[in-house]
Structure formats: structure tokens, C-alpha cells
Image: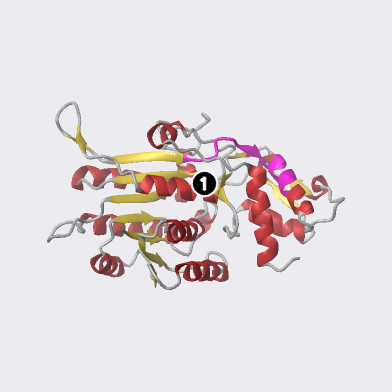
């Protein structure tokens, strides 16, 4: 099975490819990533080195490039003929989109359009074409929705950041392409993904860095924001299951084609507030010997107002994913943070 993964050096992309190489010997994978410097490129190279090691030079090829480059995307599709496409390439970060909007339009809008167009033109001239496009959306699309837990049926027309708006645009555009060109697409609304070798701009990563360095941690919304932290292995397993189960092409009651289109939340479904999160993280850092045994996290907290682009809570209703594909994330927060802390100590040589 030929699989194209964009954002291959990213947190979720690299973990997905690693798992596919380890567990699916029939997978032949090409990855694309532009290696942009939004965060430390060294970490992206570290992930790629792990992929090279597990692949042994077989069934895995990496292309440095940008999905906003239509010529590159079309060339990769023409040469590789992917059967499944997993589009994880995106400019991430809700708050960063306030400062640097252009990069979001380039990657999240133009880049995603190029992927859809390549999927559209992959069919014909004896080619089966792409059987399923899976793409990353985000819990950010729920915006100022005050109802929790978030359901896929909730309104998502009040984004609080350009990042959220681009992800909603992806969902709408995918629906149009599914309807017009019969392309099976599934969008996955990820909820606060964390774990080893994650993104340094995420709160858990920066909290760890500051605590280990003896700095204070700012908790926005006075520490009362709720986040549905979801461990990366659960996300990867959910993506793998979704990849294998494209929406079926069928007709509705009126006899007209129904777009082969789906959206799913992937979240833990058990949100934690930031004060409790920091307490568990501190306990795991003490257990690992990265903080002194008498460390008091409360003395290192600064509670501050909410930032622009933030929401007070994220909370996934995963009943649709459970109903359709019998999957639900299961890794508890303490287990996930313990694994991250061990990786952090190893990666930064803190033992």
C-alpha cells in the first residue's frame, strides 16, 4: 500500500510513519516536509533520523519540499501514485497566527488546495487514484462555542484565530471536493496532542523547560482553562484506523450521491485544568530526578489573564468515532507525561 504523509518531520507525522514502518510491512511511504523553522529544526531532524533507523533504508523516502509548491506536489503524485494520503502539513499555533498570518494562508489554504487537486487528478489513464484522503483539522474550529463536550454536530462558525479559520476552511473545501469529485475524505479534529519529541511551542513542553530551569510558569486564564490532553500514540492509532476505513460512496434517499466525507474528534475525553496538569507534571519530574524532592509547584506559578485566540476549555465528544470505528483514546495523563519526562531527560542529557 502506497501512503503519502505530508508534515512527515512533524510531531504527529513522524510518529505515524514510525508506527506504520514498525507494524505494517506492506506500507510503502513517502513523506514531505518543508522543515520550516517555526520551532527547532534539530528536533525535526531527530525525528527523521528515527524513521531512517527503523526503516533500514526500505519502504520509506523523504522529500524536503513545501505543499504550497503545486509543481512539487503534482510531481510526487505522478511518480509515487499514492493510494492513501495523510495531510498533516500545516502551520500550527493559534497565537502565532496573530503575528504571522501569511504562513497560514500558504500552508493551510494553498497547500491543502494543492493536495486536493492532486487527489482529484490522480484518477484516470489506468490509475486507480487516491482511495482516501485523511487530513488534520483541530479542536480550534469550535472557537467560542460555549457547549462542552464538543460534538462534530456543533456550530463551528466563530473562529477565534486565523489558524482555526484555516482549519475550518480545510473541512469545507474537503466537503466540496468529496461532493464534486467523489473523493473520500476524513477530517480529524485533534485535541491538544502531547508526548515524547513533541512540539516545543506547546504548553507541556515549555512548562517542563521552565520548571527544570527554575523559572516561573505562567498559567493563562488564572490556571482554570481546561484542555483535553491527548497522548500522541492514541492519535496515531486513531489515524491508522481511519486510514483503513474511508467513507463509502453511496446514494441518499433522494437517489443523489452522498459526499464520501466524514469528520471525527480525536481527544481523550477527560480534560484537566492547567493547575492540575502542572501538579502532575511536577510530580513526574520529581520522580525522574529532574526536580528536587521538595519542589513546590505552587511557588512557581504566575496566574495571568487569558491570551487572545485562546478558549477556556476543550473537551472532545468522541462518541462518533467510537460508534463508527470502535476506537477511543485511552492513555491517562500521568502515564503520558511520565513517558514525555523520560524522553525529555534523555534528549537533553539531563541524567
| Residue 302 seen by the camera | yes
Quadrant containing the C terminus in the rendered view: bottom right
The answer to if 288 sits in the magenta stretch is no
State the residue in front, 148 or 2: 2
| Residue 137 seen by the camera | no
Q: How many marks?
A: 1
Residue identifier under label 1: 234
Q: Which secondary structure lies at badge 1?
A: helix
Quadrant containing the N terminus in the rendered view: bottom left
Residue positioned 28% across, 56% down in the render: 83
State the residue in front, 122 or 179: 122
Which residues, given as a range, are shown in magenta? 266-281
Task: Tell me residue 34's x, y (percent).
Answer: 43, 68
State the residue in front, 217 or 96: 217
The answer to if 280 sits in the magenta stretch is yes
Task: Tell me residue 175's x, y (percent).
Answer: 29, 43
Task: Tell me residue 26's x, y (percent).
Answer: 35, 59
58 in relation to 22, above or below: below
Task: Tell me residue 183's x, y (percent).
Answer: 24, 48
* Left or right for 290, reference 263: right
Tell me where residue 180 sits by quadrant.
top left
Amino acid at each position: 500500500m502506497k501512503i503519502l504523509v505530508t508534515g512527515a518531520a512533524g510531531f504527529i507525522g513522524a510518529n505515524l510513519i514510525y508506527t506504520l514502518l514498525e507494524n505494517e510491512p506492506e506500507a510503502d511511504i513517502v513523506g514531505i516536509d518543508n522543515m520550516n523553522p517555526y520551532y527547532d529544526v534539530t528536533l525535526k531532524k531527530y525525528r527523521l533520523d528515527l524513521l531512517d533507523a527503523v526503516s533500514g533504508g526500505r519502504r520509506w523516502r523523504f522529500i524536503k519540499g513545501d505543499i504550497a509548491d503545486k509543481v512539487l506536489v503534482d510531481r510526487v503524485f505522478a511518480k509515487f501514485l499514492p493510494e492513501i494520503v495523510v495531510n498533516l502539513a500545516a502551520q500550527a499555533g493559534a497565537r502565532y497566527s496573530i503575528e504571522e498570518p501569511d504562513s497560514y494562508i500558504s500552508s493551510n489554504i494553498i497547500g491543502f488546495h494543492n493536495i486536493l487537486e492532486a487527489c482529484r487528478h490522480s484518477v484516470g489513464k489506468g490509475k486507480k487514484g487516491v482511495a482516501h484522503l485523511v487530513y488534520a483539522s483541530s479542536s480550534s474550529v469550535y472557537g467560542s462555542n460555549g457547549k462542552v463536550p464538543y460534538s462534530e454536530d456543533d456550530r463551528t462558525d466563530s473562529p477565534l484565530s486565523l489558524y482555526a479559520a484555516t482549519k475550518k476552511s480545510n473541512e469545507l473545501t474537503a466537503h466540496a471536493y468529496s461532493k464534486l469529485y467523489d473523493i473520500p475524505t476524513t477530517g480529524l479534529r485533534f485535541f491538544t496532542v502531547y508526548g515524547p519529541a513533541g512540539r516545543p511551542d506547546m504548553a507541556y513542553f515549555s512548562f517542563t523547560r521552565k520548571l527544570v530551569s527554575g523559572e516561573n510558569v505562567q498559567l493563562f486564564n488564572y490556571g482554570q482553562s481546561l484542555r483535553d490532553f491527548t497522548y500522541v500514540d492514541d492519535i496515531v492509532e486513531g489515524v491508522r484506523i481511519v486510514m483503513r476505513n474511508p467513507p463509502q460512496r453511496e446514494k441518499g434517499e433522494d437517489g443523489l450521491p452522498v459526499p464520501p466525507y466524514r469528520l471525527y474528534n480525536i481527544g481523550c475525553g477527560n480534560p484537566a485544568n492547567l493547575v492540575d496538569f502542572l501538579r502532575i507534571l511536577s510530580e513526574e519530574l520529581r520522580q525522574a530526578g529532574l526536580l528536587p524532592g521538595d519542589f513546590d509547584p505552587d511557588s512557581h506559578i504566575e496566574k495571568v489573564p487569558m491570551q487572545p485566540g485562546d478558549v477556556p476549555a476543550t473537551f472532545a465528544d468522541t462518541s462518533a468515532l467510537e460508534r463508527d470505528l470502535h476506537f477511543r483514546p485511552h492513555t491517562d495523563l500521568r502515564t503520558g507525561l511520565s513517558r514525555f519526562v523520560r524522553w525529555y531527560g534523555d534528549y537533553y542529557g539531563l541524567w
